[in-house]
Image (tube, grey):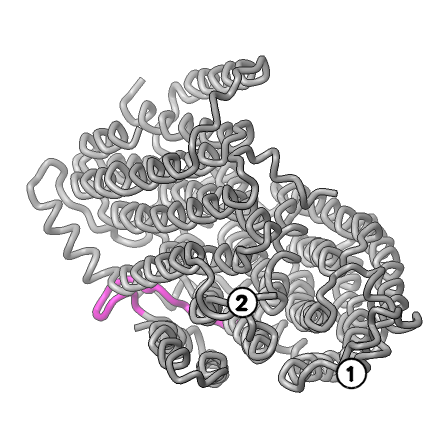
Amino acid sequence: MFTPAIDILLFGAFLIPPIGYIEIKTRASGLRALFTTLLLLASLAFTIQLRNETMDGIVTVPSSPNALSFSLGIDRLGILMAGISVFIGLMASIFSLRYMEKDANLTEYYTVLVLMVAGMMGVAFSADLLTFFVFWELMCLTSYALVAFRKETWEAVEAGFKYLIMSSAGSAILLMGFSLLYAIGGTLNLGALAIAMREASLAEKPWLLLTFALLMVGFGIKAAMVPFHTWLPDAHPAAPSPISALLSGVMIKMGVYGLMRLSILVFLPILPAWQGWLMVLSILTMFTGNLTALLQTDIKRLLAFSSIAQIGYILFSLSLGTFEGITGSVFHIVNHALMKGLLFLCAGAFFHSTGSRDLNLLAGIGRRMPITGITFALGALAIAGLPSLNGFMSELYIINAGIQAGQILGISLMIVNIIISVAYYLRIIQIILLRKPAESLQKVREAPPSMMAPMVILSILCIVLGVYPEPVLEESKAAASALLDWILYAKSFLP
Amino acid sequence: MEAFTTYLSCALILFIIGLYCLVAKRNMVRLVIGIEILINAANLSFITFSAYRQPGYVDLLSQSIVVISMAIAGSVTALALVILLNAYKHYGTLDVRKLRRLRR
Amino acid sequence: MCISIAGIFWTLGAPYVAVFQLLIYAGAIVILFLATIMLTGRDGREKIEARDILGIMASIALGATILLLFENIGMPPSVTVVEPVLVEEGSGKIGQAMTAFLWNQRGFDIILQGTILFASALCCLALMRRRKEGRRN
């Protein structure tokens, strides 16, 4: 089958329904959550082992025993993206042990969570657009179900339906783009397409531009690029908090990953044609996210808009098209996954103890839940760009890359955006930590240890990566050079 | 106009009809039908390119793509309709413009 | 629509795909739609507003423009990097070759698609269930 890292998740997902049945009959609680956590830990271990294998070259997996074509091509960039998906998935699964214990349909929840992580890993690993599409649809379909999970509330159902319509329209547009890519290249293997695009003369430029436009729209809907971002502020608050952490921390980055892989590997020869569009759209995304976040009173909606703004930074760095730009993009993807995952888990802890997401009602809750409050403040400061935390490192790298590429106007607009974002991050830190708790919050206790553990781990990582960013930075640089090295990539697939 | 252009423009017109459906229709079931039309347009485009890549032969890769994408489309439609039924239970209407409680 | 597209697939030399189209679309998806419409009752006719007619005319105009523009466009100039698997059109071997291709060349994708079907079935069951295990406050 595919590599062990994905296989164990796929097989394990089929085992969760029987375990759920056993759990219900014997009234042992937490069995499913434990099994899911073990599955994700095993997958993380396999991923780390895979990473060592990719140091020598690209690990390829054929699409069937004795097949001529390859479905997976695992390089440094794929390992990095899969690594963050399985890590944040692991944190979400540990968090769900206590957070979701009162919900119904938990068997389906854990099964679908495992399949979603498997889908995200497969998207990161795949080298053939058919396999990519199947894993992409697996990831999307499971996310629709997870957003609409709490179906007793109207909010989840409304947000789930709108998200489904927009996202599956995006997948259909992607499929149309793939068909045009197939027409130009005759195959759907990414390496072969890279060669084909470089051999193709510029005579058929209209076809290339149309294909790229379709792909940008398709991936842009998933990555919450303006003007396709309207599903995100509704879907992320409506999902259960560990799922919001996964969605906002990893899944929208998979949209960026898809765009990255196709635009750099395949469409780099026509860079001047699409660079301007992507840059303008990314700057619009930044402004929309930050300016709208200033007005929010719902904590998760504010975090969702902040995600949109951060995607703007990542896309801006990608649109530079240089080695530093791609490195900055990947570096910020990793950092933002950690920070936003942490913030959403903390918001979930607040919701779990008070039942409310309104910032006015949550005032001062950090004083009643000290550890959660401090980790939340750390996460918010990290995203705001406090030096010595990881957000500052990646934003600095992107600004550096932009100045090197000569995009002074874009960089100055990005700095303006960072300053605007500091305003609302400081505001929520002040509300959560520095106000006096209201009367309704007197009964609030600290979050249970299994919910605190992921938050503490993530915040420690934020601090460590801020002070010592070298390992992740080196990994991002290796990922960027693996992406740009299309010759090595293509050679791994052709005999 | 040769046959190839006819088929391809069919696919493109279906695509535009699907997009129009998504943008302009109010009934939630029609939105899901719009997604189906989009996917059908993409499938038709795949098969058209498969048939005309080399005259006299068909390419099997794109046919397998279409078979797989059709099954996926079926699953997504089923899930969409289930969520739609849940929405109907909550709101009592199939008008997507009435689902506005989240926009305040 | 799905039946006519199945017809187009047949004439384009893809009988396997045509049968699949009929099975899945006309056989399953249309039934799902009928079930949904029956379960949700009639909402009454949508009134046709001026905006709708404008939209339809704009789409027809766009379609006609595209048809005229694409008068002479043939296949995009394509590059062959990987040898494709080709079967003679109109031969009776397409069905067999298709099965062989699907399982020998793309077996894992088919298994993965089975996983998607499983996930979808599970989610539909969960979303349609009435409250059974534990109540959420």
Q: Where is residue A25 in the image (x, y as percent from the top left)?
A: 37, 80
Above or below: residue A443 compared with residue C68: below
Q: Are the residues flagged by discs 1 and 2 from a single subunit?
A: no
**Residue A227 part of the magenta segment:** no
Chain of the residue where label 1 is placed in the rendered structure: A
Left or right, residue B98 beside residue B47: right
Q: Which range is magenta? A: A62-76
Question: Measured along the vertical axis of the image, is residue A334 above or below residue A311?
Answer: below
- Per the model, the C-alpha gap separating discs 1 and 2 is 29 Å
Which numbered tag is attached to residue A15? Answer: none
Residue A45 x/y as whole percent? 48, 85
Neighbour tally class for label 2: few under 14, some 14-19, many 20 plus, Cα within 10 Å: few
* Residue A51 in sight here: no
Residue A388, by quadrant, is: bottom right
Q: Give the residue pinned by disc 1.
A: A371
Residue A149 seen in render: yes
Q: Could you say where residue B82 lies in the image, as x and y percent from the top left?
A: 43, 48
User: Measured from the top left, where is residue C99 in percent x and y?
Assistant: 15, 54
Q: Which amino acid does label 1 sit on?
A: Ile
Q: Name the residue furthest left.
A: C92
Per the image, label 1 sits on a secondary structure element best described as: helix
Q: Mark 2 points at which residue?
A: C135
Residue at (52, 75) in percent of width and height: A86
Name which residue type carries label 2.
Answer: Arg
For this rendering, which residue is in front, B14 or A64? B14
User: Does residue A23 appear left or right of residue C55 in this picture?
Assistant: left
Is A423 on the left-hand or right-hand side of A343?
A: right
Quarter of the image where the C terminus of chain A is located: bottom left
